[in-house]
Amino acid sequence: MADAYIFDAVRTPRGIGKDKGSLHTVRPTDLLVTVLKAIQERNALDTREVEDVVVGCVTQTGEQGTCIARFAALEAGYDNSAPGVTVNRFCASGLQAINQAAANVAAGWSDLAVAGGVESMSRVKMGSDGGAMFDAQAQWRVGTVPQGISADLLATLFGITREQADAFAVESQKRAAIAMEHKRFDKSVVPVRDDSGLVVLERDEYPRPDTTLEKLSGLKASFEMFGTQFGLDSLTRRVYPQVDRINHIHHAGNSSGIVDGAAALLIGSKEKGQALGLKPRARIVSAVSTGDEPVLMLAGPVPATELALKKAKMSIGDIDVFEINEAFAAVPLYTMQKLGIPHEKVNINGGAIALGHPLGATGAMLLGTALDLMEERNLSTSLTTLCIGGGMGTATIIERV
Amino acid sequence: MTTKTKNGAVELSFDKDSGVAILTLAMAGGHNKINEEFGEGLLEASEWALGQDGLKGIIITSGHKDFCVGADIDMLYKERDAERFYGRVRELHQGLRRLETCGKPVVAVINGSALGGGCELSLACHRRIAVNDPKIQIGLPEVMLGVIPGGGGTQRLPRMIGYQASLDIILQGKQLRAPKAKGTLVDELVESKEHGIERAKAWIAENPRAQQPWDRRDFKFPAPAPTSTDARDMLLAAQAMLYKKTAGAFEAPKLALSAVQEGTRLRDFDRALEVEARYFTQLAMSDQAKDMIRTLWYHRTGAEKHKDLPALAKGQDAGIKKVAILGAGMMGAGLGWVCAKAGYDVVVKDIKQEALDKAAEHVAALTKKRGRHLTDEAKKALEGRIKLTLDLGDLEGTDLVIEAVFENIDLKHAVIKETEGVLAEDGIWASNTSALPISDLATASKVPERFVGLHFFSPVEQMPLLEIIAGEKTDERTIARSLDFCKRIGKTPIVINDGYGFYTTRVFSTYLMEGAQLVSEGHAPAAIEWAARTAGMVIGPLQVFDEVTLTLARKAMGQAEKYMSGRARADEGIALIQAMVDTHARHGKSAGAGFYNYENGKRTGFWPGLAELAKGTVEASDVREVGERLLLIQAAEAVRAVEEGIIQRNRDAEVGAIFGIGFAPNSGGPLSYIDRLGAREAVAKLRDFAERFGARYEPPKLLVEMAESGKRFFDAV
């Protein structure tokens, strides 16, 4: 098997995913065009060499429908010969795109691909694509609950308290603020511009560096009413009958932010890199996805991490940098607790609680963040993992070369 | 000029002048029920009407008291051939489609109750006009019998009134009184059938080209639209509420929701009906539906109609006018109110004025809550029929005394001796004891042949069951008179033979004690409750234990020891209750402390002390097995009651358990539960449980014999 390498990684800044967000007026295609163009320009890439454009996107409807990957590539001026494919593995779609592109390179079926993700949550609402998951039959036969209920269930089952979750959130904000202050994201962030070249958004706009424990303690748990009054908590009982009451700890301040953004990485074989004069920055060591119990839903990073390590013949101590998506504070807290990972190694530049979680793009953004971090700190390995709807997990290990 | 004709189901008339055809549903036997004859008759009638020259519109009404109260249950119950059944359902759908797409306005004049298929027939009309009479019920109760509306109801109603309002009716099997049905199941209310026909004719004249909304090209589903996120959220909430209420134990409401969700996504209405037909067929063929229909329809109506029960001689009167109740607690006061409401003169006696004052409050509260529909005059008359007294003299000439004093045999004997003299010459003495053998109580009576057990359930104004216990010497006429009384107060009877705990109490005790036993074994209390509910029990054992109070069980332990000695028991459960009551003052809900903690009468979570009292530990409960244990321990007890002759008719075992103690209605009752499992499998499971959890699970002899001979309690369908 050949190795797949990362030559470059870029992302847009993350805009607040509401009407008031800076990127709200930008089409999702244009978000993707921004990063695809950046990849092309930064690497002086002849796009006839691109054998696929693999893009993660969760809500593939409306203006994110009809294979946004293909049309963004064409609008970005990529050669007609560069095909596109849009993939959906819920919140890990962006990482899945990278893993798929890498797998093709490793298999020898492809030599060069651009992989990443996009999501304009302000324009295409989460869940607006309807879906199999929401059928009553899925409920009767399998069981599904909204993610927030799962997150609170996870916290309840593993004794994660509101105080811990809030403290984690404050730390995420603090780390993101420091990273931004030291311009640690600037290496990979490309501003979003309009067609006249005017800057629409230059830096991440979601962080709230003034967040304090006290401020968070005043926020109401988001899913308490849905859970208790609308009976959603009782949907968890078929799997967790012993849980009498779910401790609702998550709120807007300790859960991931709803944002807009896109990311792209350039991935290929060593030989293709040499031929095109591209310098490999990291090697993809292992890339896996796992399935787990769907009602708890968010515990996936643990089995995914374990499998990725196993495939790489590594142990947890071999990893220098962890990116564990902060969908909800309980997810990284649970993963750290379960796998014995020190907080210092996790989400060093903050995470989605501070920066936001543009569903389909996040996985690709996190991998880029991990790569930048390793280079900046001269570390050699990182593992990026995300929890996923339907009880799945995806993880990717990379090492610098 | 009017033309008339008729077929097996419908009387038809066509008035040339107005151009209106009237189809009067008038099947032989006094009831209109949907079966093949009905379908063919209606279709033929529609074709006849449509063939009339100058037809402007069609009115459908009934020649009977009811409009049409649904499908022929026999057909539904006996059919096991899915293909044939599905074919019939599709034919019915097509017949109704023919009517609603005929191009002429069709109006239903609902002059009597329209339930199930009858209601669905009206939904297939372009307009529904109902007589404004609270006695007329309109609704879709199908899920109560384990099926879903199968005549287009799950598709037409949501398209008419949207998800929320339609699911509210369909998922809960609601029946609305006509005056309350306007705006949902009914478009217009009228004073009489004649007035309705008149209004229908006017509507026909104004709407010559009536069409169903869903057949119009510009049809818009009432917001939220099926594919919207609002609809998704609303339906998710409906799933959650359903799960919260039923723990997923009932298939019909679940699949009703699936049928509504999936069918309403289809633009083509005929294909949407196909979705409904497939779910309807699936359910109609299921064991759950068969068992529910057998008990909740056949056995319930059998009990309500006193089928195979002692009856008064023709023309004879029960001779009960004045009823006295001894003991003015919640039960006594409630029972007094129930009797007064039925028109009896009532005396409620106690020995404490304080108790009478409380009873007066309770009576007033009941009138306020449950007598809302009564006029002020009727309310006054009702309360006027109740006399609260300390004076034994007020009981003079009582035709029926119902004793509801404390459960102590010596006290009861004393009360019997003290008050028997007030009875009218032919008076009946009844005890509302929940466990003490009637024959033992009757030893204190001078007229044991007129001594009977009338076991009511709390809250008496709400609970439908009356368990009538015949003591050794109770004569048949006393039972017949008691049954007459039972009918007048609107209760459903079971009539059983005497024995400690009768039928319901002994079955119920096994449930409660097994709940306590499971706690002691170390199962998480929440998992025990959930296991019971997923098995179909209406309330979890610990919650209901708190409601009947642990103190009551604690006190009954001595009695049980006396009457049931030698029986294997839930020893650890008993020890747990003893410790909870004696050492930890956990007396139950009324004391604010039982298995649960309470605040202002509301459960706030389990008492954390339970974990320490548990003898064992369980890593993760097997919910399915716990549920099976909770049902089987009761079912085995029910079989013992049959074996011992306490139960005289198997019907009573089912009706008593479901309506008296909340036994899993999805099973059809404890004996149906055994039948579904198969006696052999039941014996095997009981033996396995006996080995693992204690000898109280040993299968009764009767069941072992049935397993050997392959017998069942009820005929298979």
Image: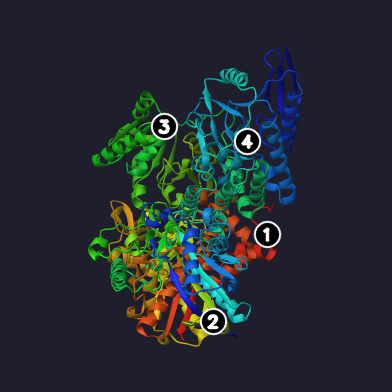
Does the CB distance between marks 1 and 2 fall below 8 Å? no
The N terminus of chain B appears in which quarter of the rendering?
Answer: top right
Q: Nearer the viewer, mark 3 or mark 4?
A: 4
Rounded to the nearest whole Å, what is the CA distance between mark 3 and mark 4?
54 Å
Kindly identify which residue carries mark 2.
A273
**For residue B112, which quarter of the picture?**
top right
Rounded to the nearest whole Å, what is the CA distance between mark 1 and mark 2?
79 Å
- In the image, taking residue B562 as reference, residue B144 lies left or right, namely right
Rounded to the nearest whole Å, what is the CA distance between mark 2 and mark 3?
92 Å
* Element type where label 2 sits in the image: helix
Q: Earlier in the sequence, mark 3 or mark 4?
A: 4
Estimate the x, y position of residue B53 in percent, counting from the top left.
Answer: 76, 18
Labels 2 and 4 in the same subunit: no
Residue type at tag 1:
Lys
**Display colour scheme:** rainbow
Residue type at tag 2:
Gly
Labels 1 and 3 in the same subunit: yes
Rounded to the nearest whole Å, what is the CA distance between mark 1 and mark 4?
58 Å
Given residues A21 and B543, the one toward you in this image is A21
Kindly identify which residue carries mark 4.
B217
Up the image or down, B114 lies above or below B404; here it is: above
Residue type at tag 4:
Arg
Residue type at tag 3:
Lys
Q: Is residue A393 visible?
A: no
Estimate the x, y position of residue A60 in percent, counting from the top left.
Answer: 54, 58
Q: Around disc 4, counting alpha carbons within 10 Å, would you say few (fewer than 14), some (14 to 19), or many (20 or more)?
A: few
Labels 2 and 3 in the same subunit: no
